Amino acid sequence: MKIGIIGLDTSHVLAFTKLLNDPSERYHVQGGKVVIAFPGGSPNFELSMSRIDGFTRELRDSFDVEIVDSIEEVAHESDAILLESVDGTVHHEQLQKLVAFKKPVFIDKPFSLSSKVAIAMIQLAEGNQTPIMSTSALRYAENLTNVLRISDRGRVIGADCFGPMELLDKQQGFFWYGIHMIEMLFTILGQGAKSVTTITDKEHDVITGVWKDGRIGTVRGNRKGNAQFGALIHFENGTEYVDINLYQKPYYASLLEQIMDFFHDGISRVPLSETKEVIRFVEAANESSHYRKTIII
């Protein structure tokens, strides 16, 4: 399978290309090869523009990836597409150019920066018979998925996730890094959140979600001190600690395996209804932080 990349302003493009194109890579993912890419970039986002030249050179020189001048060229020459642009605000516009080709598109996090746009993107893709999928790699961290396979602890009754919470003005609060832990929370509890309350200060945030069935899940974000990802998963018969940093297989490799399965059958491994709810949850967490009150989803 020929894979194209759109947006060369994130380290994910190097991680994915190495895993796909280098057979000597320990966690090499089979089934496709990155052959073509469009650098893209957001002129008003310094982090985006500062990365493009270096990542473009490495893809071209180290992996022999063809670099082209348009999204359409990538779509025409690819069987499937990794939409990797680091700036979530451009994903809708880029997807509008891709749906005419009706090829599967993985859209890296954040899918969008508003629930209204997320709904529009899903409707656009469905209306044009274009399979799409979006998620954070943390959803497929090996230690997390292993704990969720435990069958002798009863049902999951709650969860507390934590990790680094860097904020960037251009990416609207928790959409930048908070989405990682929120994706973990939805992996554990599933859909059905009804309200969000955020407590925030300069160095830490705590986001509390209440689900319709009464379960409670929290996300703790740290801007000082601990930069480790992890979770406590509360079962009916005990609590399991998940250390995301202690893994055998990198979570990028685990995610890419899911993406390749999606590319081959067109079925998103994360329901789009859940992706939409994740975006609304992040949006509500931002609103709660700003207005200092509970937000009903």
Image: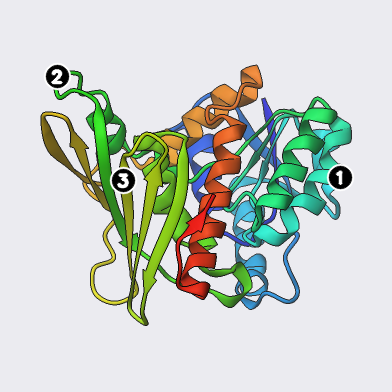
Label 2 and label 3: CA atoms lie apart by: 21 Å
> Disc number at residue 243?
none
Q: CA distance from mark 1 to mark 3?
A: 40 Å
Q: Tag 1 or tag 2, which sits nearer the N-term?
A: 1
Earlier along the polypeptide chain: callout 1 or callout 3?
1
Residue density around tag 1, few if under 14, some if 14–19, many if 20 or more, within 10 Å: few
Q: Can residue 226 be seen?
A: yes
Q: Dot 3 corresponds to which residue?
A: 216
Question: Closer to the observer: label 2 or label 1?
Answer: 2
Q: Is residue 205 above or below residue 30?
A: below
Q: Could you say where residue 85 lies in the image, as x and y percent from the top left?
A: 66, 56
Residue at 35 percent across and 42 percent down: it is: 250
Q: Which residue lies under the disc numbered 2?
A: 152
Q: Earlier in the sequence, mark 2 or mark 3?
A: 2
* Three-letter amino acid code of the residue under disc 2: Asp
Q: Give left or right: position of 292 versus 89.
A: left
The amino acid pointed to by label 3 is Ile
Looking at the picture, how far across and down is residue 138, in whole percent?
A: 40, 45
